[in-house]
Amino acid sequence: MRLGLVVSMMVCFPVHADELLGKILQRLAEPPVIRAQFVQERLIADMTRPTVSRGRITVSRQDGVLWQIESPVKLALAFTQNGVIETGPDGVRRSRGQRRGAAEAEVGRLMQGILAADEKTLLASFDASAQGSLERWTVRLVPRAREMARFLKEIRLGGGRHLETIEIEETSGSYTAIRMRQFAVADRLAADELAQFKAP
Amino acid sequence: MTLRARSWLFLAALAVAAAILAGMLSRGVPLQTNVLAMLPATERDPVAEKVVASLSAAIGSRVLILFSHADEARAKAGAERFAAAASGAGGLRSLMVRLPEPDPKLLHKLYAASRFGLLSEPDRETLASGRFRARDSALQQIVSPVGGLFGLPLAQDPFGFFGRWMASIVPSAGAMRLEDGYLVSREAGRTRVLVLGEVDGDVYDNAVQARAVAAYERGAQAALAAEPGTEIQRTGTVFFAASARAAAMRDMDRIALGSIAGITLVMFAVFRSLRPIALGLLSAGAGILAATLVLILVDGELHLVTLAFGASLIGEAIDYAILFCAAHLAAGNRWTPQMGVAQVRPALTVAVATSLLAYALLGLLPFPGVSQVARFALVGLAVAYLSVQWLLPGLLIQPGRRDPALATGWAAQMLEGWRAALRGRRAVLAGAIALAVCVPGWMALQPNDDVRLLVPRQPELAAQDAAIRATTGFDAGSRFFLVRGTSEEDVLLKETNLTKRLRELELGGALSGHQAVSDFVPPRAVQEASRALLQEHVFADRGALTRTLTEVGFRPEAVRKLPSEFERAPGPVTVADWLASPLSTPYRYLWAPAGDALPASVVTLIGERDPARTNLAAAGLDGVTLVDKATSVSELLGKYRAWAAPGLAAAAAMMLVVLVLRYGGRAALAVLVPVLLAEALSLAAFGYAGVPVTLFGVVGWTLGLGIGVNYSIFLREGIERPGATAMAVLLSACTTLLGFGLLAFSGVPALRHFGLALATTIAGALLFAPLALAGKK
């Protein structure tokens, strides 16, 4: 039903929809560095209740996305074009997806694509459709490649000036909702943040 | 037997040989284009040699075709059109535009039950060092936005151990990504789509090659017609082999045509008659026909290098007929065939004896290709020699009508003049100066033993190959590690010693990846140790495990199930399990490459950027050897080239023996001096021109020695008839230059060096030939 609605909207106003999406992505991609607080709720199949985590997110157009979870466990994930670098609660850093073409590297690229609103990466991997206005919009991302469609059902983004919500539906039935607030724009990353992107 | 009857008998024998050869050729020319087949076994170790052969067959049949277009959809459509059209043509099989979807169930079927023995290296370290914290580890998986995205559901792998191990075995696809089954890369505004395929049959079989190339061309045309603007690049052994064959064929056409046209022209200018040309070609043709037939019968196939060489053999074989016809011209109306044969026989016999000696020396080289060339020459020259005595006399019975003095006088004068110029102290002085000028040239000589000299790589194909390799990371696989042990387990353990070092190189960027069976099937000992680590640090305290998993939020059923799955897990994954799974299909050649009886495996390398460091990876590892066919071949070429100087000296010494027997000491030296001077000058010319010294140049000098000395012999034997002899020598040198010398323009570097060495030596031997008359009236 909803899909039908989206499809008919896209057929009726294809130019408009494309324009909106382009404008949204363009606007999101404007600040070189953006920081925010986040709250994530993740409900995993086989679990009795959702797990809530909190932390800080730093998005750099140039370097990637830094995902720093502060509770319930300390964990930092640096998503780059080449993979994911993980810093555990014990401070041990681990690079994942070093091998090019590996799934982890793909995830790193995708997360950067979504959070840094990299139009090229997004449109290469997803069928994207935008709704609403430039001030209050939602974007729906459906994976195009069957490899990704096997574990990912869809991603929904929402926001205004900034990307405020991300909802991820996995094919396993797991569901993740991320809400971001307290945005701060900057020109460049701090030195300690930059260090997180360096391979261990 | 009359002269005519003998000629007819000889002709009949030739006709029978031609009929047999035609019969064999109609069933396809057994022409070998695998240049490496020319070479002897490089590995002292027969297992390594066998593995090289089976691996190059497995990897050599691959073709990679890259479609690039600014529009992604059109790049994909072009690839699809290509595959549809090319598959229909035959010649290429299993063309894959979209890889079949890897069934996740296959992975789970093979590994999931045994997952408690499969740990990635960092996880093993964490567990062994006691740093593992169950609660933190489970929470990390849950809160990470990408935790548990692949592999098993989190409840079955709550700490992500199995997921991380699976990620570590995902094959690298270079810069390409798998999207919808397409292997895709995006760069500089263009989308590239890779199509994989295999050649249907033996890559070095000419019919197979022709079909594969035709299929490619048909596919490429269809793709370009449907999607204009598509850029298509291709690589694969078959394309290189086919282009080398085409180049050799073109060489052969050009050299054979050039020789025949040039020789005909020169001969006609001198003899004013077509008969000597016909006789010369008949005599040379008899030699080539016999040599081709004998070698196909003995060796089963002809190498293309032998064929190219055979085409130029016309140059030497025809010399014998020339000597005979020159005698005919000089005899005028006193000619009888018996007299002619008697006149030329001594010179011919000495010449053939020295030539055959030089070729026999080449035949002793343990290079199958070089030895075939030498045997081709032995048979060809022997038959040409016999044809001059048995076939030609019956065909040249009538005396000539031209005035001998007029017809050959110019040559006699020329010889007299040149002989005068080279006489006495002036000659010694000129020789000394020439040798002095040679010295800097000799100093500049540079050896080159690169195996690529043998394989003419069409630059355009080589560029496409480099581009595809850069994009895909696929490698030709000429360098790999061979791992041998006493048992399956031993081989796997030895492999892991190696892969540990390779991973370090991969982290440092010296290598992009490797393929090894032990990555897919860790040794039993490692799997058991991993399981023991999990037992000790995760499953020992069941109560604590249950509490932790319940606390972080897993359902009670899931919490109960995990320990029982650990208990009931079957034994370790074995190589047999892996081989039985379709997952192993692309990698099957890695295991037991020398047959099931010999426990061995192969570790292949992807994207080597620092071969020097890879070379060190096997250092000190028991049972691990780096096999590098190209380097081995180059080393071998170098070894034989290094033997060249003593080899040439030995050949000259053997000739000297024949010459001393015939002429005595001093005169024998005089006969040998011209060609030795020629060799010295030729070497210097290579140095000055910056042409590298290769084994093939050395072969040219060796042959030049054999042919060049003939001119001195002809002169010395025939000086009583100066006109006829000088003319024969001049004509012989001209025809040889036109025959062999044209090889200097060959596209195959090896043939080019051979041709250059020979042509310069022949030219020098002709110039200095009158020195052989020293002490003669």
Image (cartoon, grey):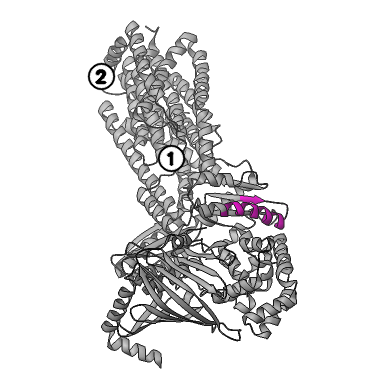
Q: Which residue is mark 1?
A: B453
Disc on the earlier residue, 2 or 1:
2
Please tell me which residue is depicted at 47% across the width and 46% down the height of the picture.
B21
Can you see residue B690?
yes
- Residue B339 lies, with reference to residue A1, above or below; the image says above
Q: From the viewer's side, name the closer residue of B730 and B460.
A: B460
- Residue B423 lies, with reference to residue A126, above or below; the image says above
Disc 2: which chain?
B
Q: Is residue B151 left or right of residue B238?
A: right
Q: From the viewer's side, name the closer residue of B170 and B419.
A: B170
Is residue B514 shown in magenta? no
Q: From the viewer's side, name the closer residue of B16 and B376.
A: B376
Characterize the local packing of mark 1: few (<14), some (14-19) or many (20 or more) Cα atoms within 10 angstroms. some
Is residue B501 shown in magenta? yes
Q: Could you tell me residue B758's position as x and y percent?
A: 39, 29
Q: Could you tell me residue B179's position as x and y percent?
A: 44, 71
Which region is colored magenta?
Answer: B482-503
